Amino acid sequence: MPNGLDEQSMEETGGDHREISVAEFFEKNKHLLGFENAQKSIITVVKEAVDNSLDACEEDEILPEIQVLIDEYDDKKCRVEIRDNAIGLDRETIPKVFGKLLYGSKFHKLQQSRGQQGIGISASAMYAQLTTGEPVTVYSKQEGEPCHKFVVRIDTEKNEPEIIEDEVIDSDSDEFPGDQDYYFDHGTTIEMQIEAKYTKGHHSIRNYLKHTAIMNPYARVVLREPDGNKIEYPRVSKELPEKPKEIKPHLHGVELGVVLRMVDNSDARTVSSFLQNEFTRVGRTSAENICEEAEIDEGRRPNTLSKDEVEQLLKAAENVKLQSPPTDCLSPIGEDLVLKGLKKELNPEFSTAITRKPTVYKGNPFQVEVGIAYGGDIEDEGSYEELRYANKVPLLYKKSACVTTKAIEEVSWNRYNVSQTGNRPQGPVYILVHIASVWVPFTSEGKEAIANYDPIRKEMKLALQEAGRKLGRYIGRKERKEIQEKKKRKLTSYAKEMAPAIAELAEEGDVDDLENRIQKMVEADYNPEQL
């Protein structure tokens, strides 16, 4: 043994340690990604696939058409098939997207999107092979091109795709998936067999797709349940949200380790050009002021800077006034589409929506949207129903840990004519809260709740209060009208008895005429001058 170390001493000094891949880590810790149990896992699989489909369609400005087909077999096992009408994937990309965790990650891309981490759909494929031993099958067809079929496994020790089948098939072939009811001329189809339990209720695919349809009213989604029941969530708008643009990081929000890496990888020849080219809202004058404040020569090469000097630059940047980062990297759906989504799925008697102006937290732009739906077809089940969204994706789990719930509970709903028990509103009301951001601070890799940061909670609370005032005015008018109608009915019922009594007291007058005049007064909101 080298250096005189025997096998026992190597074990004692850590010689049995070895590197593991990210796929191997999540294979042993699948609960971190939302695969905690059979009921939740099927929602996670569908969610990741649908999110990818919606992002792909919006990126190419295609009105989304998505089919979700579920079949049950054996005990606690399901076959899941998701189809979309996006532009499809090329042959080289398919195995990496579905067979390699973190491939194509948008983690460092400052642009609003549903997926950020790059572990969603590939983690679903990993869960499938882990629980049923079956690989994922992918069909992808680009317009005017043949359909590519791949059967892929993940080599978890290497985090690399293992291609089992790779072939081109004709759309008329028996191998082509599904039937004409679920066929798109271009797009991607995913098939996987997973350990799962299909259920109905709040935590279900049906409810997840309903929530998705509210926030994406420009998408048409069809669910075919295991019993053959078909549920359609129709499109009610052909208007897609504004496409977000990618931006560069902002100096007031970036951290030291990130800048050190950027310095090492930069081709800039001077510190000044590095600041101008690598960060948003830094012009020539701002770069000069930062270098002067940090007492660093702006003409130095960036890669000659020490860690302490980079830290000096960051501290100096805090003392230099910079414009807030641009907000065209965000893509809120807007008040009009929020209202259309609420009305389509909930059919309330009243609804309102608020989209706040963009703001910045730690250099990252974000924007809050709120919608409230009240009455109508909404059943009064006591407490309110909460619709939580991050970048248009529904959040079904860990409500109590989410900043949206904290913000709702900070609002005094009583002042808006909504009954309240403790700090929670009561009655037939749905409250929608959406955060659009280039960086959503989730509490875990499962992306189920948003961290309780003060600036985010404050924005949500302000939006909720603004929407609450509108709801309060509506409920107030409604209650006053009900009181008025009740008085009107009482006076109308007394009209027949009042007319003869008045005529007798006055010793004159036609009883029928007096009765008609009383009725007119009632209809005229008790204002005799209108008669």
Image: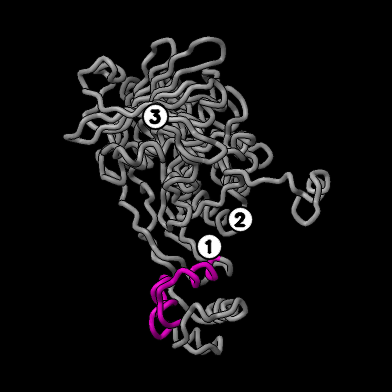
Query: In the depicted view, which residue is nearer to us: 379 or 55?
Result: 55
In the drawing, does residue 14 fall left or right of residue 85?
right
Amino acid marked by disc 2: Tyr
- Asked if the stretch drawn in magenta spans residue 108, the answer is no
The residue shown at (83%, 48%) is: 9
| Residue 453 tag number | 2
User: Looking at the picture, does residue 509 appear above or below residue 115?
Assistant: above
In the drawing, does residue 122 fall left or right of residue 277?
right
The residue shown at (63%, 46%) is: 19
- Asked if the stretch drawn in magenta spans residue 273, the answer is yes
Res. 84 in view: no
Q: CA distance from mark 2 to mark 3?
A: 31 Å
Residue 345 image offset from top left, x and y in percent:
39, 29
What residue is shown with label 3? Answer: 345
User: Looking at the picture, does residue 411 appear above or below residue 366?
Assistant: above
Q: CA distance from mark 1 to mark 2?
A: 9 Å
Residue 503 image offset from top left, x and y in percent:
40, 24
Is disc 2 surrounded by few (<14), some (14 to 19) or many (20+) residues within 10 Å? few
The residue shown at (46%, 68%) is: 265
Q: Which mark lies nearer to you, 2 or 3? A: 2
Amino acid marked by disc 1: Tyr
The residue range painted magenta reads 258-286
What residue is shown with label 1? Answer: 361
Tally the numbered discs.
3
In the rendered image, which quarter is residue 512 located in?
top left
Q: Earlier in the sequence, mark 2 or mark 3?
A: 3
Q: Earlier in the sequence, mark 1 or mark 2?
A: 1
Is disc 1 surrounded by few (<14), some (14 to 19) or many (20+) residues within 10 Å? some
Secondary structure type for disc 3: helix
Task: Tell whether label 2 touches label 1 (CB within 8 Å).
Answer: yes
Secondary structure type for disc 2: loop
Amino acid marked by disc 3: Glu
